[in-house]
Amino acid sequence: MATVEFKKEDCVKGDFDEFHVKYKMSEIGNGSNLLVEILHKDGIYNMVQVPIRRSDNSIFICFSEPTDGRLIFEKYD
């Protein structure tokens, strides 16, 4: 399993009052299984369910506010 971490600073404000982190499908993989975890102030990660959108060979992980976290995935190409 691969892991990619993201920071609050990586979150970009989207069109519908949401924030997202963008990855190219070549980074994550097309058809990969994604797990999204949020990092809390106490240093503990918790798995969350968030909207994931795909468009123009990109994957957008969407949040209601900027957050620190990580993606865990098994890449299937």
Image: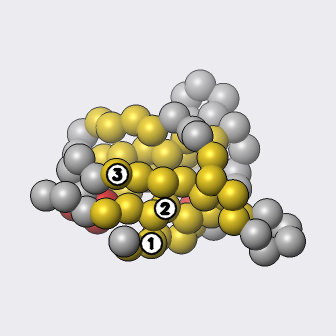
- Residue 57 is situated, as x and y percent measured from the top left of the image, at 23, 45
Q: Which residue is mark 2?
A: 71
Q: Which residue is found at the position 60% from the left and 58% from the top?
A: 37
| Nearest-to-viewer mark from 3 and 1 | 3
Which residue is at the far right?
Answer: 42
Q: CA distance from mark 2 to mark 1?
A: 6 Å
Describe the element under mark 1 as helix, strand or loop. Answer: strand
The earlier-in-sequence mark between 3 and 1 is: 1
Depicted 8 relative to depicted 50: above or below: below
Which residue is at the far top?
Answer: 16
Q: Are marks 2 and 1 in contact (CB under 8 Å)?
A: yes
Check disc 2 and give the amino acid type.
Leu
Q: Which residue is mark 3?
A: 33
- Residue 22 is situated, as x and y percent measured from the top left of the image, at 43, 52
Q: Quadrant of the N terminus?
A: bottom left
| Nearest-to-viewer mark from 3 and 2 | 3
Q: Residues within 10 Å of mark 3 (few under 14, many from 20)?
A: some
Check disc 1 and give the amino acid type.
Thr
Describe the element under mark 2 as helix, strand or loop. Answer: strand
12 sits to left or right of 74: right
52 sits to left or right of 9: left
Of residue 29 and residue 18, the one placed in the foreground of this image is 29
Q: Quadrant of residue 75?
A: bottom left
